[in-house]
């Protein structure tokens, strides 16, 4: 009888050590588009919004350059009075977020500064439209 109990105990311990206790991996950032509330370990797969900067009124001879956190992301050369139809509209400046951090943006034209602001990714919008003027 003791031998059966010892054998059962050894088998139970062996089976318990073979089961995986690895934590669930996924995107753990709630501000990302693909947040996984069941994930315990971030696996680097988080994806974030894209911001498209556009002008509703534009002087065609004076393009507008957009910078995000001090780096130029593009030049606006077209106007969209009602906003661009999608996040890849020609003549717009586009920025793809790579984290959930807020970013400062600046719009300038050859004559100087025209507008500034702050933008941050949105967990519900893949494409965020930012009207400059």
Image (cartoon, grey):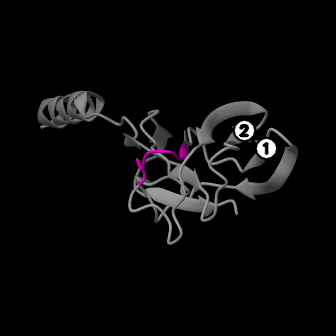
Residue 89 lies in the magenta-colored region: yes
Residue 120 appears in which quarter of the rendering?
bottom right
In the image, 113: left or right of 74? right
Task: Give me the disc on residue 47.
Answer: none
Secondary structure of the magenta portion, mostly? loop
Q: Is residue 107 above or below residue 118?
A: above
Give residue 123's position: percent from left, percent from top: 50, 61
Quadrant, the N terminus: top left
In terms of depth relative to the viewer, which is nearer, 60 or 3?
Answer: 60
Sort mark 1 into few (<14), some (14-19) or many (20+) by Cα contacts within 10 Å: some
Residue beneath the point at 79% across and 44% down: 108
- Residue position for label 2: 67
Cβ atoms at labels 2 and 1 below 8 Å apart: yes
- Residue position for label 1: 108
Residue 7 appears in which quarter of the rendering?
top left
Residue 100 lies in the magenta-colored region: no
In terms of depth relative to the viewer, which is nearer, 1 or 124?
Answer: 124
Q: How many marks?
A: 2
Residue beneath the point at 63% across and 35% down: 73
Q: Earlier in the sequence, mark 2 or mark 1?
A: 2
Sort mark 2 into few (<14), some (14-19) or many (20+) by Cα contacts within 10 Å: some
Give residue 79's position: percent from left, percent from top: 54, 58
Judging from the image, what secondary structure is the residue with disc 2 in?
strand
Determine the CA span between mark 2 and mark 1: 8 Å
In terms of depth relative to the viewer, which is nearer, 96 or 16?
Answer: 96
**Span colored in magenta:** 87-93
Give residue 62's position: percent from left, percent from top: 70, 44
Judging from the image, what secondary structure is the residue with disc 1 in?
strand
Furthest residue in direction bottom, as rendered: 82
Q: Is residue 28 above or below residue 57?
A: above
């Amino acid at each position: 009888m003791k031998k059966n109990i010892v054998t059962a105990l050894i088998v139970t311990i062996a089976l318990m050590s073979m089961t995986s206790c690895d934590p669930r991996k996924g995107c753990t950032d709630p501000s990302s588009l693909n947040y996984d509330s069941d994930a315990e370990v971030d696996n680097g797969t988080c994806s974030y919004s894209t911001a498209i900067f556009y002008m509703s009124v534009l002087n065609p001879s004076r393009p507008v350059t957009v910078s995000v956190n001090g780096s130029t992301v593009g030049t606006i050369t077209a106007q969209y009075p009602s906003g661009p139809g999608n996040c890849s509209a020609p003549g717009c400046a586009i920025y793809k977020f790579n984290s959930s951090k807020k970013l400062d943006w600046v719009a300038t034209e050859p004559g100087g500064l025209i507008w500034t602001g702050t933008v941050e990714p949105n967990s519900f919008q893949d494409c965020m439209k930012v009207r400059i003027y």
